[in-house]
Amino acid sequence: MYRPPATGPALPLGAVACLMGAMTLTGLYVGLSKQLLLAFPLFVLAGLRFAIAALAMLPWLRAPRPVERLGGRDRVVLFLGSFLGNFLFTLCMLGGVQAAGALAAGVAMASIPAAVALLSWAVLGETLQRRTLLAIACAMAGMGLLALGRGTEAQAGAGAPLWAYALLMGAVLCEAAYVVIGKHLGPRLGVRQLAARINLWGLVLMAPLALWQAQQLGFAPGAVRALDWAWLVFYALAASMVSVWLWLKGLERVPASRAGVFTVLLPLTSAAVAVLWLGEPAGPLHAVALGLALLGVWLATRPSA
């Protein structure tokens, strides 16, 4: 049962459910992506994700209220949000999962709150507290353990090449940039319009690569199982639409400093999918790395005293 911390008032149960659902879905699709990469080539998978989400989000392009016209600078920021938060994030995350495994990806994704704090300090001028520096150190230590120990444990994430961990950390920085850009543009466009426009840019950027790879590899959609297509639809809607809406809906009634605590569900869910569903072996190295990552989440998101 959820119990609010003693440092603040009780959180609305509806908002708590939204935040928990958003992070659980995110952990699920991070873990699920490894299974999808067995059925779809990387660029094809990413392109289909954006295409399916774009169709589902067409109604979101109709603004429910007058929207502020974006200037030239804001249009550039919008493009950067999609390039970093959708295009590069998807390539880095899928490439990292394919090479290092879903368990290592879960450890990496746990460092998102610390990365957001770091970029907010660098870009928005927000204060960087000592505990945030400790959170960043924990996140880096967790990924460093997996990377440095890759030759000592013949396990899913431990045997991956160094570039796989670089891709996962690149995905974390891209997602953090997406969050910071969302803080800047969200009030001007609204949640749904911002998500839909960023996804459309992601489709424009990914489509040439997806079409090229499909042609080069002779990708045959009819050869893919119906179950894999169903998982792809779930992945597309969860990644681009449902988890975004749930998270931002929860943030309407929960301070960001307290909402960040719920990101602990992301690495836990991803790790559970990796071990219980995908059958990735987990050893002491993974346990210590995940523990450091979760400590980093707690340090980055705990309320100020």
Image (spheres, rainbow, N blue to C red):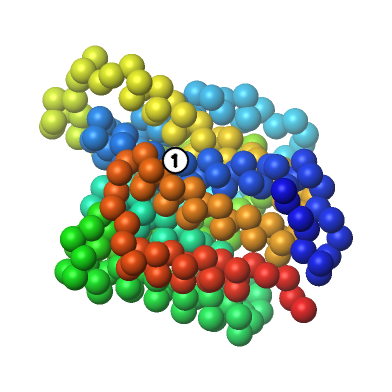
Q: Amino acid at mark 1?
A: Tyr
Residue at position x 49%, y 53% in the image: 268
Q: Position of residue 184 (x, y in %)?
A: 64, 57
Mark 1 — residue? 29
| Secondary structure of residue under mark 1 | helix
Residue at position x 66%, y 79% in the image: 127
Q: Quadrant of the C terminus?
A: bottom right
Which residue occupies the foreground of this view, 46 or 9? 9
Q: Position of residue 255 (x, y in %)?
A: 76, 59
Q: How many marks?
A: 1
| Residue at the extreme right of the image, as rendered | 9
**Residue 259 relative to residue 81: left or right:** right
Which residue occupies the foreground of this view, 227 or 53? 227
Q: Is residue 216 above or below residue 243?
A: above
Bin the neighbour count of mark 1 within 10 Å (Cα to Cα): few under 14, some 14-19, many 20 and up: many
Residue at position x 42%, y 61% in the image: 107
Can see residue 258? yes
Q: Position of residue 138 (x, y in %)?
A: 47, 75
Can see residue 114? no
Q: Position of residue 67 (x, y in %)?
A: 72, 40
**Residue 199 relative to residue 19: left or right:** left
**Residue 112 relative to residue 283: left or right:** right
Q: Is residue 258 above or below residue 18?
A: below
**Residue 89 relative to residue 63: left or right:** left
Which residue occupies the foreground of this view, 241 or 86? 241
Where, by quadrant of the figure, is residue 43 drawn?
top left
Where, by quadrant of the figure, is residue 206 drawn?
top left
Q: Is residue 229 above or below residue 75?
A: above
